[in-house]
């Protein structure tokens, strides 16, 4: 078995990693979902908005989402929940579409998560 120098092996592995991220990067960017927690006096729910949804918001943040909700009175969004993937890893995944109704005791805030966030499958609308 021929001996492959460590630096060469490292370089080849790094090149493969870079090429893989270049190829898969655009596909992941199109499916990016930002999570928000919507809190009322009775409960809270985590929702996901795609980049296209965020582009429709003033400021493209939680404040813009709150403003849009107040202006429209109600909106339809995807509720997210934690579930286990086939490999056993925890992920944030779209659960189902829900309707949010504006109320005085509403708060919207970004929802950071260390878990992988799955994209919204538009075919399930």
Image (spheres, rainbow, N blue to C red):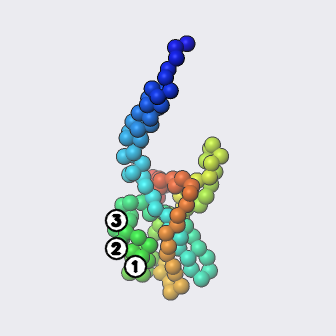
Question: Can residue 97 be seen in this snapshot?
Answer: no
Closer to the camera in the image, 22 or 96 = 22
Residue lying farthest to the top in this orientation? 1
Q: Position of residue 68 (x, y in %)?
A: 39, 76
Sooner in the amino-acid sequence: mark 2 or mark 1? 2
Label 3's element? helix
Q: Quadrant of residue 20?
A: top left
Image height check: is 9 above or below 34? above
Q: Earlier in the sequence, mark 3 or mark 1?
A: 3
In the rendered structure, are the residues bearing label 2 and label 3 in contact, judged by CB atoms less than 8 Å apart?
no
Give me the disc on residue 58. Answer: 2
Residue 11 tag number:
none
* Circle 2 Cα neighbour tier, 10 Å, few/some/many (<14 / 14–19 / ≥20): some
* Residue under label 1: 67
Position of 18 with respect to 89 (left or right) is: left
Residue 30, compared with residue 96, is above or below; it is above
Q: Position of residue 80 (x, y in %)?
A: 55, 62
- Note whether 4 is above or below 79 in the view shown: above
Crowdedness near tag 1: few (<14), some (14–19) or many (≥20) residues, C-alpha within 10 Å = some
Residue 55: image tag = 3
Judge whether 105 appears above or below 121 on screen: below
Residue at position x 42%, y 52% from top? 31
Query: Which residue is found at the position 52% from the left and 14% from the top?
Result: 2
Which corner quadrant of the image does residue 56 belong to? bottom left
Residue toward you, 75 or 28: 28
Report if the CB atoms under discs 2 and 1 are less than 8 Å apart. yes
Q: What residue do we see at 39% from left, 45% from top? A: 25
* Secondary structure type for disc 1: helix
* Location of residue 21 in the rendering, given as x and y in whole percent from the top left corner: 41, 41
């Amino acid at each position: 078995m021929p001996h492959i120098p460590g630096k060469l092996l490292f370089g080849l592995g790094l090149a493969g990693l870079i090429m893989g991220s270049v190829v898969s990067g655009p596909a992941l960017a199109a499916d990016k979902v930002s999570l928000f927690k919507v809190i009322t006096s009775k409960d809270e729910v985590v929702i996901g908005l795609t980049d296209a949804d965020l582009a429709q918001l003033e400021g493209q943040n939680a404040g813009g989402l709150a403003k849009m909700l107040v202006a429209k009175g109600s909106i339809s969004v995807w509720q997210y929940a934690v579930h286990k993937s086939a490999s056993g890893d925890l992920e944030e995944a779209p659960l189902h579409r829900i309707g949010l109704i504006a109320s005085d005791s509403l708060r919207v805030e970004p929802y950071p998560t260390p878990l992988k966030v799955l994209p919204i499958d538009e075919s399930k609308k």
